[in-house]
């Protein structure tokens, strides 16, 4: 058997205050499980704002605060153009967002033309854009590690006047993960299929961090590998664990992961893994490798489903 895991509100003066909301239908209803799903606690209504984010990860954090930015640059596809925003975000909000090129080559003129009151970026990528903005536009730069989704969430919450929402969502995720630890045991390996590479995921990724927080142990040899080190079929024994979590990016223009996964699944080496033989393989989406609070909520629900 193959398992598949499903995936105080005042804005500060730099974000436009409006009573208009955009209804979003992507977040599922809370489940009947104790406490309901964490994804079900994410916003389903969003206040339009005069905010632009210069990083799509900060864009996701803003949505988690119930604020819909004007738009954002996105990551670059294999074809060298901006990728669409991920389909796990609320479609009715994402469809209205302006895409300002890619994070590496943002369209400065388009950002300026959008007339934002507030621009949120990172110290690494934002300065060239901020130099082309109107002098009255407020620019705030996130200087933390891009893998630290808690710090990025706190930063965005503070900038849009929603500190309480940021803290509450982080606490809800951490408390739910901690509550799962007594129920979880054993080992779990996580592997990501992306482009030409099959990459290990360890505790530096949101999926690995939360899975360990919920009580699982990552196989020592696999966890010691660099997340950028591609695995070959000959190394497949490193995945041996009680549960194998497979991170796929189906529907993404940036990778050909699922096709490569099919090749691995067809291999006798894959079939020889005990977890495969038991049916303890779980397919999940790209959130397991995406360091945002929105994705942390999805990963938390996935882990609860894995534990059963």
Image (spheres, rainbow, N blue to C red):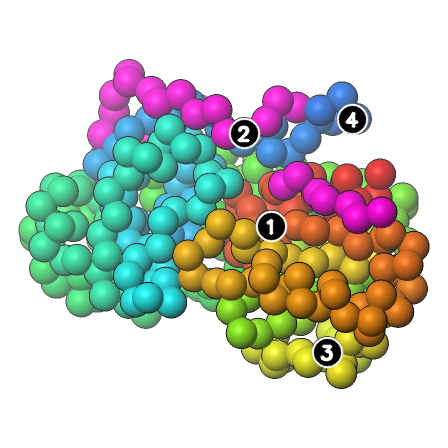
Task: Give the residues in magenta.
Answer: 1-30
Mark sitting earlier along the chain (3/4):
4
Neighbourhood count class around disc 4 (C-alpha, 10 Å): few under 14, some 14–19, many 20 upward = few
Mark sitting earlier along the chain (1/2):
2
Q: Is residue 265 magenta?
A: no
Give the label, 3 or 4, closer to the camera.
3
Neighbourhood count class around disc 1 (C-alpha, 10 Å): few under 14, some 14–19, many 20 upward = many
Measured Cα–Cα span from mark 1 to mark 2: 15 Å
Which label number is shown at residue 33?
4
Mark sitting earlier along the chain (3/1):
3
Q: Position of residue 104 (x, y in %)?
A: 28, 67
Which label number is shown at residue 233?
3
Q: Position of residue 85 (x, y in %)?
A: 39, 47
> Disc 2 designates what residue?
27
Image marks 4 and 2: residues in contact by CB distance under 8 Å: no
Q: Is residue 29 magenta?
A: yes
């Amino acid at each position: 058997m193959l398992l598949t895991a499903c995936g105080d509100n005042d804005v500060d003066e730099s974000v436009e205050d409006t009573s208009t909301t955009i209804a979003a239908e992507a977040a599922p209803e809370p489940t009947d499980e104790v406490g309901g799903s964490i994804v079900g606690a994410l916003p389903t209504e969003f206040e339009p704002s005069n905010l632009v984010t210069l990083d799509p990860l900060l864009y996701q954090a803003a949505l988690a605060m119930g604020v819909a930015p004007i738009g954002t640059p996105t990551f670059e596809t294999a074809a060298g153009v901006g990728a669409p925003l991920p389909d796990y975000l609320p479609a009715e909000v994402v469809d209205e967002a302006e895409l300002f090129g890619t994070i590496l080559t943002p369209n400065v003129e388009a950002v300026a033309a959008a007339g934002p009151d507030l621009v949120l970026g990172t110290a690494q990528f934002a300065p060239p854009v901020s130099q082309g903005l109107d002098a009255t536009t407020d620019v705030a730069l996130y200087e933390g590690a891009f893998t630290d989704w808690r710090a990025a969430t706190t930063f965005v919450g503070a900038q849009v006047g929603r500190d309480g929402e940021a803290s509450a969502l982080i606490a809800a995720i951490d408390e739910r993960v901690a509550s799962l630890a007594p129920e979880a045991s054993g080992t779990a390996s996580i592997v990501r299929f992306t482009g030409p590479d099959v990459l290990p995921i360890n505790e530096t990724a949101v999926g690995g961090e939360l899975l360990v927080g919920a009580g699982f142990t990552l196989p020592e040899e696999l966890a010691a590998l660099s997340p950028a080190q591609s695995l070959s079929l000959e190394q497949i024994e490193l995945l041996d664990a009680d549960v194998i979590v497979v991170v796929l990016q189906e529907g993404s223009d940036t990778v050909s992961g699922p096709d490569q996964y099919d090749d691995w699944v067809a291999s006798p080496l894959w079939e020889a893994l005990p977890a495969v033989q038991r049916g303890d393989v779980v397919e999940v989406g790209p959130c397991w490798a995406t360091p945002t609070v929105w994705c942390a909520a999805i990963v938390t629900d996935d882990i609860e489903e894995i534990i059963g």
